[in-house]
Image (cartoon, rainbow, N blue to C red):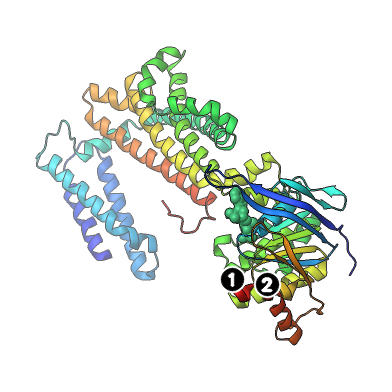
């Protein structure tokens, strides 16, 4: 198995190293990956113990093989339009050359996201608990949630951009809204469906209403709340990208859109790669947090 | 045995569940129930299924409010649940998000930060119910019998004056059930808690109770009180034990079914 992967690794860098190119970075990446996998493979054949490597090497190998094919299709033989599909060399070069701006844009986007999540998440849990726990609050707040919630926050972008003094505040508001709705709905359903027996157990222990909410209803709703957080984060990604492409003057979405307008397609792909890595990392972190908080659940599905 | 609690008086107790369906009559679960339970006594309640035993227990715990009549502990009328009356439910109902230890500590945690004494108390309870080594386990990792032990320990942590059991061992295999019955007796001897145990198992009622309250079908009333004057630990194959079983069964009319 390792041998096959090594062969694939061998083939890919070789097909590229013989090629003249303006940017050295892609080549460097390939060489580093190649040397790394070679070292790991040697270490593995000696100790037979590097499980992570054994498990992942086939798919990493295939991934690089695919990049190699793409490289052949663009840089080497020019089978497809290289204006819209720049070769990996150019993309990787763009990634490295623009890294400072990309990191700045990423930082801006992530900072906005975090503000939106915190505000929307906290308000969502509060609203969800209120309508899930108290029939009075349910009576007054439920129509409000049901009316406002289903509106896609992206529709509100033009209004928000003109209503708020800064586009930063407008984006933060929209992101909070994206987070708020799913968290509210799923906290509500979690709290409303807490097993009555758990609350009665707490009653016989002399728990107060506040204690029943915080020590029984909320922990019991955690699985549901995490589904809400997941949905909210995914919704906020969409909202953020659309907002940045429509009017916000910073961030990854803005960068990608701007580069598209000036035909900098290599930079567009560089932006997309950063975006994909960042968002996938964020979701992974969320699931790690969830795994920690829900370790009491039997047969929890890991991310 | 020195009693540390007060007697429980049940006076003219009536509980009606209003029907949600207009075409159906209201459910009268209990009617004219009178009883007196002595401090530190062990009482078994037995009766046909659906007669109102759970309802009675929930009224004593304060989870339900009587339609008529009242229950007193000493001269205090029961109006709401309180930590001085523990209830062990039919299902263990452990909080799945807490470990065994945290579940048992729950009653103390809501009173405030745990003291050194609290920690010792919890450790002692874990030993008492034989769960040493499982302190950090989550409920899904426990067997049925272990979960029931944890539930009993959780109810005991507040050191209640009265401990109510609602068919707690019904779902367990015979062997585990017998072990837990012995555990309950041991706890009763050590803590001198007043115990009221609902069961549908005649043998269990006689094995545990100093008195067995046999109930009528719904609406439940106390049909007959059978005194069990056997010394603990009781032997299930004893002649008197078997005779008492016959007596309870005939009071419950099981022979005519
Ligand atoms: N919350 C409730 N609402 C309506 N009816 C109830 C409720 N609780 C119990 N009952 C009815 O009261 C009767 C007695 O129930 P229960 O006390 O659970 O009986 P047991 O424990 O003796 O089997 C049953 O007919 C049951 O359907
Ligand atoms: Mg019952």
Q: How many marks?
A: 2
Above or below: residue A246 compared with residue B49:
above
In this rendered view, identify the residue nearer to me: A206 or B30: B30
Q: Residue at x 23, y 32 (%)?
A: A266
- Where ligand 1 lies, by quadrant? bottom right
Instruction: Say which label, 2 or 1, has the lower sequence index.
Output: 1
Pick whichever, B178 or A115, lies toward us.
B178
A145 lies left or right of B223: left
Which residue, given by chain and number where applicable, does mark 1 sit on? B172
The residue indicated by pointer 2 is B180
- Disc 2 to disc 1, how far (Cα)? 10 Å
Image position, residue A89 (x, y; %): 22, 39
The answer to whether one can see residue A215 in this image is: yes
**Does A268 sit above or below residue B184?**
above
Q: Residues within 10 Å of mark 1 (few under 14, many from 20)?
A: some
Q: Residue, x 31% and y 38% (percent of image)?
A: A273
> Which image quadrant: the N terminus of chain B?
bottom right
């Amino acid at each position: 198995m390792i041998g096959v992967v090594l062969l694939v690794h061998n083939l890919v860098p070789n097909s590229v190293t013989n090629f003249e190119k303006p940017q050295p970075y892609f080549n460097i990446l390939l060489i580093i990956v190649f040397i790394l996998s070679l070292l790991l493979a040697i270490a593995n054949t000696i100790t037979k113990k590097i499980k992570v490597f054994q498990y992942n090497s086939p798919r990493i190998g295939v991934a690089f093989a695919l990049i190699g094919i793409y490289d052949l299709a663009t840089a080497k033989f020019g089978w497809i339009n290289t204006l819209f599909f720049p070769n990996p060399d150019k993309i990787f070069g763009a990634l490295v050359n623009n890294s400072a701006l990309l990191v700045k844009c990423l930082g801006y986007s992530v900072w906005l996201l975090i503000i939106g999540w915190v505000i929307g998440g906290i308000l969502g849990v509060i609203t969800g608990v209120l309508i899930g726990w108290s029939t009075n609050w349910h009576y007054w707040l439920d129509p409000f949630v049901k009316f406002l919630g289903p509106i896609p926050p992206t529709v509100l972008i033009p209004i928000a951009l003109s209503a708020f003094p800064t586009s930063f505040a407008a984006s933060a508001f929209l992101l909070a809204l994206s987070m708020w709705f799913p968290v509210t709905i799923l906290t509500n359903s979690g709290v409303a469906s807490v097993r009555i027996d758990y609350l009665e157990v707490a009653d016989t222990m002399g728990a107060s209403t506040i204690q029943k909410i915080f020590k029984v209803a909320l922990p019991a709703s955690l699985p549901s709340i995490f589904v809400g957080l997941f949905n909210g984060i995914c919704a906020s990604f969409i909202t953020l990208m659309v907002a940045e492409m429509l009017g916000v003057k910073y961030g990854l979405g803005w960068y990608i859109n701007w580069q598209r307008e000036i035909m900098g397609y290599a930079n567009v792909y560089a932006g997309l790669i950063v975006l994909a890595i960042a968002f996938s990392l964020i979701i992974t972190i969320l699931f790690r947090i969830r795994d920690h908080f829900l370790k009491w659940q039997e047969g929890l599905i890991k991310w | 045995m020195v009693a540390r609690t007060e007697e429980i008086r049940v006076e003219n107790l009536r509980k009606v569940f209003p029907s949600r369906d207009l075409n159906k009559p209201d459910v009268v679960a209990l009617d004219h129930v009178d009883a007196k339970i002595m401090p530190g006594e062990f009482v078994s309640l037995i009766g046909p299924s659906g007669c109102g035993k759970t309802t009675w227990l929930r009224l004593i715990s304060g989870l339900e409010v009587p339609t008529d009549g009242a229950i007193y502990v000493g001269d205090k009328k029961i109006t709401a649940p309180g930590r001085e009356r523990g209830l062990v439910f039919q299902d263990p109902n452990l909080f799945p998000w807490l470990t065994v230890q945290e579940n048992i500590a729950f009653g103390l945690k809501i009173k405030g930060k745990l003291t050194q004494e609290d920690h010792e108390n919890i450790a002692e309870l874990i030993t008492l119910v034989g769960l040493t080594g499982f302190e950090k386990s989550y409920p899904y990792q426990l067997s049925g019998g272990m979960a029931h032990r944890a539930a009993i320990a959780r109810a005991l942590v507040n050191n209640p004056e009265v401990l109510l059991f609602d068919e707690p061992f019904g779902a367990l295999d015979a062997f585990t059930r017998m072990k837990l019955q012995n555990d309950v007796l041991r706890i009763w001897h050590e803590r001198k808690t007043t115990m009221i145990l609902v069961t549908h198992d005649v043998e269990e009622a006689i094995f545990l109770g100093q008195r067995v309250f046999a109930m009528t079908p719904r609406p439940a009333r106390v049909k007959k009180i059978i005194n069990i004057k056997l010394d603990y630990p009781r032997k299930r194959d004893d002649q008197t034990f078997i005779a008492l079983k016959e007596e309870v069964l005939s009071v419950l009319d099981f022979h005519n079914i």
